[in-house]
Amino acid sequence: MQNPKNVQNAVSVIVSALSVMSAQTGQTGHAPRPRVGVVCGTGLGGLADAMNEPVALPYGQIPGFPQSTVASHEGRFLFGRIGDVEVVLQQGRCHLYEGYAPEDVCMGVRVMAALGVEVLVITNAAGALNPRWDAGDLMLITDHVNFTGRSPLTGPNHDAWGPRFPDMSAPYDAALGRIAMEEAARLGVRLERGVYVGVPGPQMETPAETRMYRQLGADAVGMSTVLEVIAARHMGLRVLGISCLTNKNLPDCMKEAPLEEVIRVANEAGDKLTRLVAAVVERV
């Protein structure tokens, strides 16, 4: 499903709310014009620390906007700057496993695109399937496998957003990926490259499923991102994806990965992810 009326209503509320907040602080009220949108995954909300004087707008103040029910997802938009670049940060997302439909999962991305965002930086917490990688590593997403069985483009197409059959031969922007690799090298941050498989969740993977995803060519597995990227590409956004690998899936010696552990590892890796994303954004 595509929900242009809901998205436009949300954008109108956001623009009005930010204009009021600007006027209250003595600034000239104006509509936000962010060039870059950033989606924060589980435990990765610390990216907000990279923003200069952010203005927060909780999702609860936006009628019809889906509310995240997952721990560590703050549930708000932040508007501000990273360096000289105007940015909107989606601090918290919703997921299929929370009972939301694809149009709800992708509403944040669509709202950011409608606000004028041209580049989307999307992050997530994921399990490492590649046995050479460890928990705490970062992975540049070079491609993905949509294993959710869902699409945000089902139903009538909103032609103003994009074509009925959008091309997905290059869902992740190669030029942005090169910038990320260059900045990672400059910062001394290890950045792997690999394929992300998106699953509906919320249950973690069995050993047999882990083997299957690996045989499909996936290097990391998670419960977000793929639907948002489809929506972003449908609307013409350039996309950079980075996974924080919070646990290691070895099918012959599987270990439990409770949410608390996922958040802990994501928080520990958050500093290098923040430095990397900030450096990339300043070069966009």
Image: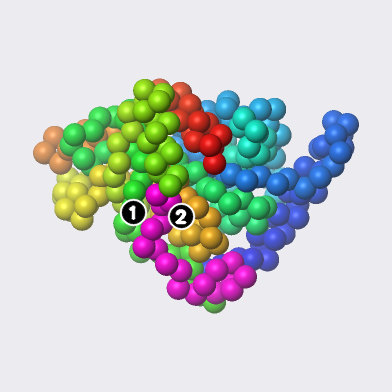
Depth order, front residue of 262/274: 274
Which residue type does callout 2 highlight? Val
In percent of width and height, residue 23 lies at 87, 37
Could you tell me how far apart the alpha carbons at marks 1 and 2 are, in whole angstroms? 9 Å
For mark 1, give the secondary structure. strand
Return the residue found at the far left. 252
Q: Badge 1 is on which residue?
A: 144
State left or right for residue 74 relative to residue 258.
Answer: right
Q: Residue at x 30, y 36 (%)?
A: 192
Residue 105 visible somewhere in the drawing: no
Q: Residue at x 77, y 42 (%)?
A: 18
Disc 1 to disc 2: CB gap under 8 Å:
yes
In percent of width and height, residue 109 lies at 56, 52
In percent of width and height, residue 51 lies at 62, 29
Is residue 37 placed above or below 8 in the rendered structure? Answer: above
Q: Residue at x 53, y 60 (%)?
A: 236
Is residue 209 placed above or below 102 in the rendered structure? Answer: above
Q: Quadrant of residue 36?
A: top right
State left or right for residue 256 relative to residue 39.
Answer: left
User: What quarter of the picture does the C terminus occupy?
Assistant: top right
In percent of width and height, residue 127 lies at 30, 39
Q: Badge 2 is on which residue?
A: 229
Which residue type does callout 1 highlight? His
Q: Mark 2 or mark 1, which is nearer the start of the sequence?
A: 1
Please rate how many residues cluster around mark 2, counting C-alpha atoms within 10 Å: few if below 14, some from 14 to 19, many from 20: many
| Residue 158 is covered by the magenta coloring | yes
Is residue 6 placed above or below 257 in the rendered structure? Answer: below
State the extent of the magenta-drawn residues as a range: 157-174
State left or right for residue 205 relative to residue 44.
Answer: left
For mark 2, give the secondary structure. helix
Colouring used for the render: rainbow
